[in-house]
């Protein structure tokens, strides 16, 4: 059915078409096709759909191995969200993507901001959380001291005395 639509699709129809194409591409494990579909929608995106489109873009970027881009997209999306629950779900997407494969966060991309580097450090820290609880707790405290206002701190235990399994894991 999507093949019947020509290149002259405009406005809201173009946004809807791109969204559906991106979702289908992600379902088929074709993240580059999803990104191409989203790239056809001129920015700035319509406000009511920006959060959804940014979520699709982030998922596609992570699936394509573009971790730095995915982090930046999640951060952009977070600025549009209005509730703590929405922001938490947004960051759950990020933490899940970062912890799914340790190789993804093995090297911080050149030019990464301090906040982006903190996400990479957090992923490495969470990957090592089951090793030695006392050592993990100390490393978590060190991370939080270096990044006191970073949203990733919610995924770490509150204090050294709190066991690592008490930290809030992302809801998948």
Image (cartoon, rainbow, N blue to C red):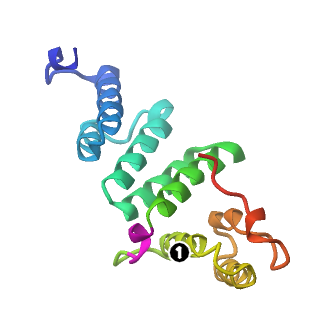
Residue visible at 26% across and 37% down in the picture: 37
Residue occupying the far right of the picture: 161
Q: Which residues are magenta?
A: 102-108
Q: Position of residue 57 (x, y in %)?
A: 38, 45
Residue visible at 41% across and 56% down in the picture: 70
Q: Position of residue 147 (x, y in %)?
A: 64, 77
Residue visible at 34% across and 39% down in the picture: 26
Closer to us: 123 or 135: 135
Residue 5 lies, with reference to residue 108, above or below; the image says above
Is 144 displayed left or right of 69 in the figure?
right
Residue visible at 46% across and 74% down in the picture: 113
Is 147 displayed left or right of 18 in the figure?
right
- Reply yes or no: does residue 39 show up in magenta: no
Closer to us: 164 or 17: 164
Is 166 displayed left or right of 89 in the figure?
right
Residue 90 lies, with reference to residue 102, above or below; the image says above
Mark 1 secondary-structure assignment: helix
Residue 12: which quarter of the image? top left
How many discs appear?
A: 1
Quadrant of image for the N terminus:
top left
Q: Position of residue 117 (x, y in %)?
A: 49, 75
Residue 113 lies, with reference to residue 74, above or below; the image says below
Residue at label 1? 124
Is 145 displayed left or right of 20 in the figure?
right
């Amino acid at each position: 059915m999507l093949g019947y639509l020509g290149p002259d699709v405009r406005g809201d129809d173009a946004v809807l078409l791109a969204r559906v194409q991106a979702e289908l591409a992600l379902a088929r494990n074709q993240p580059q096709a999803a990104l191409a579909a989203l790239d056809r929608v001129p920015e700035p995106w319509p406000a009511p759909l920006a959060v959804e489109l940014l979520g699709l873009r982030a998922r596609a970027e992570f699936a394509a191995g573009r971790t730095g881009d995915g982090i930046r997209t999640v951060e952009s999306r977070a600025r549009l969200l209005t509730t703590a629950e929405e922001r938490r779900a947004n960051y759950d997407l990020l933490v899940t993507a970062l912890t799914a494969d340790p190789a993804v966060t093995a090297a911080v991309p050149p030019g990464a901001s301090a906040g982006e580097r903190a996400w990479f450090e957090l992923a490495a820290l969470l990957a090592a959380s089951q090793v030695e609880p006392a050592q993990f707790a100390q490393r978590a405290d060190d991370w939080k001291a270096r990044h006191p206002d970073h949203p990733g701190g919610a995924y770490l235990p509150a204090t050294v005395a709190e066991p690592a399994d008490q930290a809030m894991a992302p809801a998948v």
